[in-house]
Structure formats: C-alpha cells, structure tokens
Image: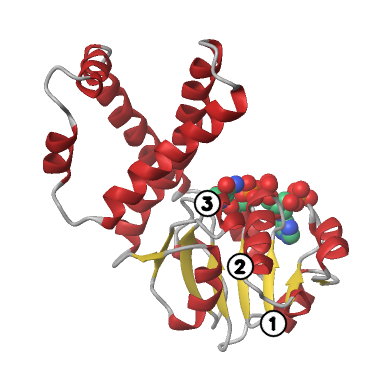
C-alpha cells in the first residue's frame, strides 16, 4: 500500500500522475485533511482514519505537508523497519524527521507530475521507490543530501519559467496574436529549449554559439537582457532560494 501523509496541492498532482500511469487507486491510502476526502471520492483512493492508521497500513509513505509541519507530522507514529518515508518537503533535512526504524529518502517533484513530466530529484536513490517516482516523470538521483538541497533550487525555477511563459504569451497576445495560440506556442518553445538541452551532450556554450546568428534576432534580445542585468538577477534569485532552504533546515529547533 502507498500512503500519502498530507494531501494538498503537491499530493493532488502526484496522485493524478499515479492514476495516469495506471497505479490502482485502491492501493493508495490518504491521510485525512486537505483535499483527501474529495480526491478519495473522485478516484477511489482509500482514506485512513488518522495518521497512525495510515502508517500501520502503508509500506511506502509520501510525506507532503508544509515544511514547518513536517517534523511534528511524522513524530510519534508507529513506524516499522520495513517502511520507507519519501519526503517531498522542501528544505527539511532527513535529520529533522523522526521516523524510528523506517528508512527515509527525499524527493523534489513538481506539479508537472500530473502529466508525467516532473523531473524528480531524489536522494538516496532507492529501487523500491522507483516505480512510484517514474509515474511522476524522469528520476534524477543525487549523490548526497547537500547536493539534493542544491537541486531543490531548480524546483523553484520551474515556477519562474511558467511566469516567463505567461509574460511572453501576454506580450504576444497584446501585439495581436490569438491568446490561445500565444500560450501554446510559448509553452512549447520553452519545452523545446529544455528538451534539446536535456537530449544533447554538447557544451551549452557551443550550442548557444551555433544558435545565435551574429546580428540576428536572438542576439538582439540577449543584448537587451544583458543590459537589464537579467543574468545577475536570476543568479540572485537562485541564491535567495538556497538561503531560504538552508533556513528551513534549522526548523527542527
Ligand atoms: N506545491 C508544490 O508544487 C510543491 C513542489 C515540491 C515540493 N513541495 C512540498 O510539498 C509540501 C506540501 O506542499 P503543498 O503546496 O502541497 O502544501 P499544501 O497545499 O498546504 O498541502 C499540505 C497539506 O498537508 C496537510 N497537513 C498538514 N499537517 C498535517 C498532518 N499532521 N496530518 C495530515 N495532513 C496534514 C494540510 O492540511 P490542512 O489544509 O488541514 O492544514 C494540507 O492539506 C511542502 O513541504 C512543499 O515544500 C510542494
């Protein structure tokens, strides 16, 4: 049985991804609260009486409560040695989660799990979680918890990219492009850039060099972005997210 402790925005997307990938809803058990009752009624997931009931019945437990709630949500539950807790809680170190003899891993999926497209960073890479994680999208194992923390910053970039898609689509629509076409085209253009970079081994500097025609339109836009200090601001945003994650790591006390 696969349990979900904390059923809010993220879990709703992960559960949709599992259903989409063909996981049987009757093998999935939800903690009460949040969207649990609604999703159980709609998809046929089981509903645990309380969190202790969930832990007694599920061998794998996805933890998806808000970071500050995570240590309190897991402590005092009847964890067993054959259980695996899969924490999606951003910035919450494994050391802050008291799960007795159960094992722990961290994952960082995004809501694209709903369409099977979430790159899901994980640490450690445990075979028994693979089938679940692969329902969300491509799995990206990290080699240490520190490396995992750095990878977590990229899950914030996922939202920034959506904002860039929105801004570019809004601009296109304001110039007269059909809004639905503008949205689709811009979203697919961002996907296309990611798919090419993810699929080719060449150094990115070389790929960009080949792409940017001297005197062409890509170069012109990059010049304006450089003049506006966009690269510096982007790095500053990444620094700010990492600092926030490191702050969350102290939430135990
Ligand atoms: N949202 C994302 O896209 C995303 C992506 C990656 C990682 N994450 C991580 O996922 C976690 C959840 O984020 P979210 O956006 O899904 O938050 P959310 O919408 O606020 O959902 C959290 C849910 O946990 C429930 N909850 C809190 N304490 C509980 C407890 N002791 N027992 C049972 N349920 C409990 C809350 O219930 P109540 O409503 O009754 O308080 C709420 O429904 C966070 O740690 C976040 O860092 C989120």
Q: Is residue 187 left or right of residue 212?
A: right
Between marks 3 and 1 in the image, the one whose residue lies nearer the viewer: 3
Density class for disc 2 (Cα within 10 Å; few <14, some 14-19, many ≥20) is: many
Query: Mark 2: is the Cβ under 8 angstroms from ligand 1?
Result: no
Q: Residue furthest bottom?
A: 82
Label 2 belongs to which residue?
62
Density class for disc 3 (Cα within 10 Å; few <14, some 14-19, many ≥20) is: many
Query: Mark 3: is the Cβ under 8 angstroms from ligand 1?
Result: yes
Residue 202: x and y in percent read: 15, 52
State the separation of the CA atoms marked 2 and 3. Answer: 14 Å
Label 3 belongs to which residue?
110
- The quarter in which the N terminus is drawn is bottom right
| Camera-nearest residue between 138 and 219 | 219
Q: Is residue 124 above or below residue 176?
A: below
* Mark 1: secondary structure: loop
Q: Is residue 215 left or right of residue 142?
A: left
Which of the two discs, 2 and 1, labels the residue nearer the N terminus?
A: 1
Label 1 belongs to which residue?
1
Res. 35 in view: yes
* Mark 3: secondary structure: loop
State the separation of the CA atoms marked 3 and 1. Answer: 23 Å
Q: Is residue 218 above or below residue 239?
A: above
Badge 3 vs badge 1, beta-carbon distance below 8 Å: no
Residue plotted at (26% across, 25% down): 231
Residue 190: x and y in percent read: 41, 38
Residue plotted at (85% across, 56% down): 38
Residue 131: x and y in percent read: 53, 77
């Amino acid at each position: 049985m696969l349990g979900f402790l904390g059923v809010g925005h993220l879990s709703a997307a992960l559960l949709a991804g599992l259903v989409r990938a063909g996981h049987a809803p009757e093998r999935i058990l939800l903690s009460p609260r949040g969207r649990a009752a609604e999703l159980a009624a709609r998809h046929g997931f089981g509903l645990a009486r309380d969190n202790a009931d969930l832990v007694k019945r599920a061998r794998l437990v996805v933890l998806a409560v808000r970071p500050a709630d995570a240590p309190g949500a897991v402590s005092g539950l009847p964890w067993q040695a054959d259980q695996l807790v899969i924490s999606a809680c951003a910035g919450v170190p494994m050391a802050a989660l008291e799960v007795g003899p159960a094992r722990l891993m961290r994952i960082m999926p995004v809501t694209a799990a709903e369409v099977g497209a979430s790159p899901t960073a994980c640490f450690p890479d445990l075979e028994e979680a693979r089938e679940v994680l692969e329902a969300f999208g491509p799995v990206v194992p990290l080699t240490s918890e520190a490396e995992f923390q750095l990878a977590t910053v990229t899950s914030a970039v996922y939202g920034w990219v959506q904002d860039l898609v929105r801004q570019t689509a809004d601009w296109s629509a304001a110039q007269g492009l059909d809004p639905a076409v503008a949205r689709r085209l811009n979203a697919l253009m961002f996907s296309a850039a990611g798919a090419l970079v993810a699929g080719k081994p060449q150094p990115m500097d070389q790929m960009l060099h080949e792409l940017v025609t001297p005197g062409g339109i890509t170069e012109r836009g990059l010049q304006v972005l450089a003049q506006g200090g966009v690269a510096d601001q982007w790095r500053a945003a990444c620094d700010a997210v990492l600092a926030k994650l490191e702050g969350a790591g102290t939430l135990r006390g």
